[in-house]
Amino acid sequence: MTSFTLYGIPVSRGIAIGRAHLLAPVAMDVKHYLIGETEVEAEVSRLQNAVVKVRTDLQVIRAHLPKDSPPEVGAFVDVHLLILHDPMLADMSLDIIRNRRYNAEWALVTQINKLSAQFDEIEDTYLRERKVDVLQVGERLLKVLTGSCSTKLPEVCSDSVSFANIIVVAYNISPADMLQFRDRAFSGFITDLGGRNSHTAIVARSLDIPAAVGVNNASRLIKQDDWIIIDGDAGVIIADPATVVLEQYREYQKKLLRLRRKLSKIKKLSTITLDGTKISLLANIELPSDCAAVVESGAHGIGLFRSEFLFMNYIGSQHRSPNEEEQFTSYREAVVAMKGRPITIRTIDIGADKPIHNGEETALKPALGLRAIRYCLAEPQIFLTQLRAILRASVFGEVKILIPMLVHAFEIDQALAMITKAKQQLYSNSIAFDSTIKIGAMIEIPAAALALPMFIKRVDFLSIGTNDLIQYALAVDRVDHEVAHLYNPLHPAILYMLSNIIVLGRKAGIPVSVCGEMAGDIKFTRLLLGMGLREFSMHSSQLLSVKQEILSSNLDKLIIQTKKILRITEPSMIVSSVRKMRTAP
C-alpha cells in the first residue's frame, strides 16, 4: 500500500499511533418497499419495539457509567434519550408508516433525512452539529430494525494488535459508544462526520484522546489494520506511513508526553507572568456537569456558561423552554459545584435559527436575524424567567450575568431594565438574590467593538466573543469549508478591534475577558497578553497549556512586540511576528 495523507478538523490535541480498526456504519440506504394495509400495524410494532430496545440500552449505559467517566458522557447519553423521546423522530416515522405505507426502515430514514436537512439550515455551529446526534440515535434504531451487530472493538489477542494501540476509524461515533474504548488499547479516533463542537469531539477532549473529525472518506480510504498516525494538533492523518515518518512521530509523541507530565506540575502554581502580573484563567461550560472538570483543571472560575444548552435539552423532548424552577436548579448546581469561584452565566443565545418553540419560522439569514438579546427582548416572559432563575442562584456564590449580541444603546438599556424588573419581582415575593450582581456585555459584533464607549457607560464588564467577531468582521462563515481559509484571527482589522476593546476597557477600569477560541489557542496567548488582556476563558482541557505560556511570559517585552505587530498591515508579516513572540527569549 502507498502512504497517503488526509486532512480533517483537529478537535483534541496530541499524537496517536496505532493500527486502524474500522467500525462499519449502518447503511442509510435501507430497503425501500411499500407494505399492505394488513401489514401496517406489524411495521408500527417493529419500530416501537426498536425504540423500547434502544431506550433500554441507553438507560443501562447511563446507569452503569464508570465513576471516572467524564461528566460530558452522561450528559450526552441524556441528550440521546431526549432525541429518542422526541415525537419529531419516532412519532413522525410512525405516521409515515401509517400514511404512506413505507416499511419501518424506510420510514425512519425518510424522517431522519428530513430532520438532517432542517439542521443543515441552522447557522449556529454547535446547534448545527446536533444533526450528528440525531444520526447516531437513528443508527441505533436501524441496527435493531436490521438486526445488525452493535458497534464493538476487537478483543486484543493477536500479536499484530496487542503490541499496538487501536485507532478507531468510523463514519460516525456516538459519545455513548466511546465508553467501550476506555478499557481497551485505544489511542485515538477518526470520523468522516463531525465538527469542532460535536458531542463526540467534546467527549474526545474530556478524555484527552487525540482525534480528528470531518475527515471526508476516511472510513472508505483507510483499510482494516493499516498503520495510522493522527496529528491531533493539525488534524492530519497519515495512513501507512514510511518507517522514517513513523519514527519521527514516535519521537514527537514521547516529547509531548514529557511536556504533558510537566504541565500537570504547574496546576497548583499561581498564574503570574515573569514580571509578577496576575492573570485570571477561566473555563467555558455548556452544562452544570462540566464543573467537575473545571475545578480539577485549576481554573479560577467560569467565564462563560452557555445557558442555551439547558434550553436545547428541552426542545424536542417537551417542546418548551425550561421553567424557572428547572433553570434555577441547574444554575444553583453549577454555582455550588464551583465552590465559591465566580461564574458568569450568558443569557440564552437562541432564536431564529434555533427556535424554542416548534413551528417558528426560520429567518433567511439566521445569523443576522432574531437571535440572542433580540429574541429575548421580543420574548420578555422567557427572558424574565431566566433572569429570575439566575438571580436566585446568585445567593449561593459569585454570579455574573452576560448579555450576548448587544449592538444598540437601546438594547443595553432595555436589557438592564428587564434585569431591574426581575429583581423587583423577586423582591416583591421576598425571594433572596444578590442585589449587586455584575452585568456584562458580549462584544461580538464589529459595530459594538467600534462603539465601545456606550457599553462602558452602562455595564460592569465586557467579554469578547472572538468567534462571531471574526466571522462578522470578515463576512466568513467559519464552518463553510469553501471559505474557511478566509477565517483569519490575525487579520489586521481583527487585531485592531481586539486591541482597541482591551485598551479602552482598561482605561475605563472595566474588566475585559476573551471567551472565544482565541483564548484557548496558545498561538495567540502572548499576543493577547501584549494587548493588555488579563482574563482568558477557554475549555478546561486547554487551560494548563495556556498557563504555561503565561508563566514564561515577560509583559514588558510582549507589550513592545505587540505594538510593533499592530502597526503591520501585511498578513504574512503578522503571522511571522506572532510566531516569533513564542520563540523569542
Image (spheres, rainbow, N blue to C red):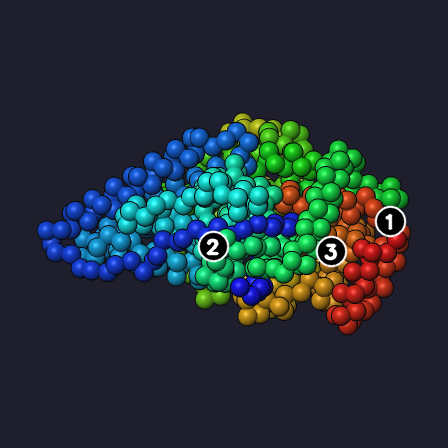
Residue tagged 1: 554
Q: Earlier in the sequence, mark 2 or mark 3?
A: 2
Assess disc 3: are there few (<14), some (14-19) or many (≥20) residues with their C-alpha within 10 Å of its C-alpha. Answer: some
Does the rendering let one see residue 576? yes
Residue occupying the far bottom of the picture: 570
Q: Nearer the viewer, mark 1 or mark 2?
A: 2
**Left or right of residue 102, residue 23 in this image:** right
Q: Nearer the viewer, mark 2 or mark 3?
A: 2
Residue occupying the far front of the picture: 159
Residue tagged 2: 224
Q: Residue at x 35, y 50 (%)?
A: 138
Give the distance between the C-alpha atoms of the residues marked 2 and 3, in whole angstroms: 36 Å
Q: Residue at x 47, y 54 (%)?
A: 224
Report if the CB atoms under discs 1 and 2 are less than 8 Å apart: no
Please tell me whether mark 2 sits on a helix, a strand or a loop: loop
Does the rendering let one see residue 212? no
From the viewer's side, name the closer residue of 271 and 401.
271
What's under tag 1, amino acid-wise?
A: Asn
Q: Nearer the viewer, mark 3 or mark 1?
A: 3
Residue tagged 3: 523
Residue 201 vertical placement versus 9 (above, below)? above
Q: Earlier in the sequence, mark 3 or mark 1?
A: 3
Return the x and y of residue 157 as percentages of the image width and height: 48, 40
Return the x and y of residue 92 as percentages of the image width and height: 27, 52
**Left or right of residue 84, residue 513 in this image:** right
Give the number of marks: 3
From the viewer's side, name the closer residue of 574 and 341.
574
Q: Residue at x 50, y 31 (%)?
A: 66
What's under tag 2, amino acid-wise?
A: Gln
